[in-house]
Amino acid sequence: MARSKTVATSRPRGNDAAPSVSQKFLAEHLGLSPATVSLVINRSPAAKSIPHRTQERIHKAARELNYRPNFMARSLRAQRSFTVGVVVPEISEGYAALVLSGIEDHLLEEGYFYFVVSHRHRPDLIQEYPHLLQQRAVEGLIAVDTACRKGVRIPVVAVSGHSKVEGVTNIVLDHVSAAKLAIEHLAELGHRKIAFIKGQQFSSDTEVRWEGVQAVAKELEIEINERLVGQLEGESSSPQLGYDATRKLLTTEEAFTALFAFNDVSAIGAIRALRETGRRVPEDVSVVGFDDIQSAAFQNPSLTTVRQPLRQMGVIAAETLLTRINAPVRARYPKAITVNPELILRESTARAKH
Amino acid sequence: MARSKTVATSRPRGNDAAPSVSQKFLAEHLGLSPATVSLVINRSPAAKSIPHRTQERIHKAARELNYRPNFMARSLRAQRSFTVGVVVPEISEGYAALVLSGIEDHLLEEGYFYFVVSHRHRPDLIQEYPHLLQQRAVEGLIAVDTACRKGVRIPVVAVSGHSKVEGVTNIVLDHVSAAKLAIEHLAELGHRKIAFIKGQQFSSDTEVRWEGVQAVAKELEIEINERLVGQLEGESSSPQLGYDATRKLLTTEEAFTALFAFNDVSAIGAIRALRETGRRVPEDVSVVGFDDIQSAAFQNPSLTTVRQPLRQMGVIAAETLLTRINAPVRARYPKAITVNPELILRESTARAKH
DNA sequence: CAAATTCAGTAAATCGATTTATCACAGCCC
DNA sequence: GGGCTGTGATAAATCGATTTACTGAATTTG
């Protein structure tokens, strides 16, 4: 991709290197000591002996000189950074973006900022980033769909985390309910031969979700045919993976009338593979996705899917993390918080042909 | 937005088990002064007078005691935060997610971290966030699809920014080329009656892109019928907006055989609206999108679209910003950097029926 | 042998804010 | 006049690292 630079006509930032006012400068300007200024600015209880007149004077000057406390200095002294780290596999369109937006909402409201890092499933980065973040003095960590090693000394909340590690709170979906919603729906439509696409090995939900599916299938007396079970392979989050997995399923020539995909993104790829091989969705094959990402409603056909409350999971993760950060030293904390799925009925499922 | 709680003086810090080793502690442990330790750890040239044996000793102890320099202290002293701020409209969007991932790639490689904030088009937040970020000591700002007010004292790079503000480098697509790619393609397929959907007022690309369309239409002698020009309305980034805009276009009863949407997300909504009203895509109406987000290739029909190199724009933005941050204060800097679009042919366009 | 140089480090100031302990002074009481 | 109280502050230590100017001893040089 070519890129051209238009001529740099401009002079440097015309702004005089505005030496930002420090507390000391402000104090001198007022003929007071930094201590007094600090006490007043921070509305410290110790400032009760400072008369109202002086306090006003200080606030006025602070406003006029546009005094902004130096964040580093304050943090250094207080040993607080008001910053957390968020570890995601990648900043993709679907899953992570929604969770992030929930996280952001709550954190910013509470005056926290956050660093995002994406490891793209590279084990070295998964290992390294938590340490880098701790060096950056984050007060807590949110791991999204990422199995964190132990040995982190700060509070950790894992969204869709399942490993029971000391110090980690897991935010998890009720995967048995989820499987039940999807499979009961398909069963009610008369489907018996159901194909499944499992998630990638590294995805932290893969195993639990699959166990849910197995349990529910047994309960509903639906046979799981090994030859109708595919798996996503590869590290991207493109629909291509679902496409590939479905093409592979189709080579077995084993018939099926419904497909339960690991997520919406792979369901989208699956639908394309089905159509390319002459199968209509939902007339010939019903497809159920998972997550309910934004574009699920606008696929053609629109996607029937199990909604995870991703945004809400982000909010809960942020809330939980901040609570833990601000809790007393050895306070108890929840090991896991469960949220519930919801079945969203759209066009990609229909009654089974017999 | 709630501001942070004016420096909580008491600090809870959930987990105090490991008192991290400071440089001073390390120095005492070694029977040396902090100065020596600092010089050696930082491989300062001034450490050349320290014999190799001692240097080894220091490094060994640092490793064994797991010494991690305190980031705040170091930043305070050096007046460097190695942090930049990224302002986006929202995270849960194809566009921003791709740009972000490019930004991240480059920044982390260079040892920088970044804060993300999303303003969701709220004017107060657009105004406030740059200041909050500056208080957090970020060394530069990247504004994605966001018009930044002036008065920022640090380097700013705007992705898809068009306002010429002192201190801002704009990363822009060549919108005339983009319009040409799309419209020439449609013209070659025999389309004369083309409908357009413009972006929202607040989107910084809307105006420039529309000017490109007008220029190219004139050049190719294609008439732009006012009644066939729609506009996205609303602040979300859901396909719903494109759906609504298209339904509105269809009420005019003015015939058209092709539609050029403002972006892929709205094109997806548009296709649904067209299909719901009995028009087949691409047989009856060809649709061209813009951006080439990940799911564009997996729509049904897959989307012909003008690709913006979004990821690359993110990388360029990060590169440019870091160059500017590390340049001498009054150095020149580019006012604009242009990148080129590419037409991606897929299934949503076809020869016009006559 | 005195002066200069090298060696091996160190003391102390600094970055900017926070916080505890302290202080000077005025007025009041006995 | 001494003691006490209250007012209105402030000095100084601290957070943890960086950096400049310096020092005492050993060694080399003139």
Image (cartoon, coloured by chain):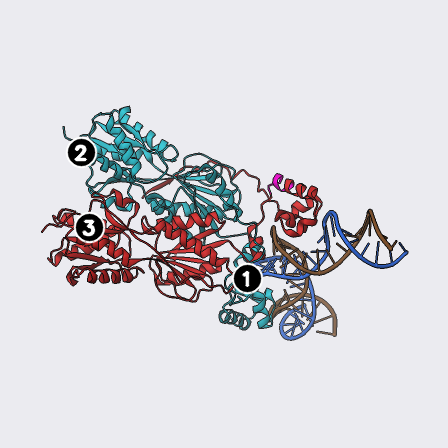
Chain colours: A red, B cyan, C brown, D blue
Which of labels 2 and 1 is toward the front? 2
Q: Where does the magenta region start and end?
A: A61-66
Name the residue: 46% across, 58% down.
A140
Regarding mark 2 in the picture, which secondary structure is present there? loop
Q: Which mark is residue A287?
A: 3
Name the residue: 52% across, 71% down.
B61
User: Which residue in the protein does label 2 denote?
Assistant: B279
Regarding mark 3 in the picture, which secondary structure is present there? strand
Q: Is residue A33 visible?
A: no
Labels in figure, total: 3
Residue B47, given in percent of the width and then of the height, sits at: 56, 65
- Amino acid type indicated by mark 3: Val
**In this rendering, is residue A119 above or below D27?**
above
Q: Tell me the chief SS of the magenta region.
A: helix
Within 10 Å of the Cα at label 1, are there few (<14), some (14-19), or many (20+) other Cα atoms?
few
**Discs 1, 3: same chain:** no
Residue A115, given in percent of the width and then of the height, sits at: 44, 53
- Amino acid type indicated by mark 2: Arg
Residue A58 falls in image quadrant: top right
Residue B141, given in percent of the width and then of the height, sits at: 46, 44
Q: Is residue C25 left or right of residue B99?
A: right
Residue closer to the observer: A10 or B66: B66
Regarding mark 1 in the picture, which secondary structure is present there? helix
Protein chain holding label 1 = B
Q: Which mark is residue B246?
A: none
Which of labels 1 and 3 is toward the front? 3
- Amino acid type indicated by mark 1: Pro
Protein chain holding label 3 = A
Name the residue: 39% across, 43% down.
B90
Q: Is residue B76 visible?
A: yes
Instruction: Check if residue A62 falls in the magenta segment.
Output: yes
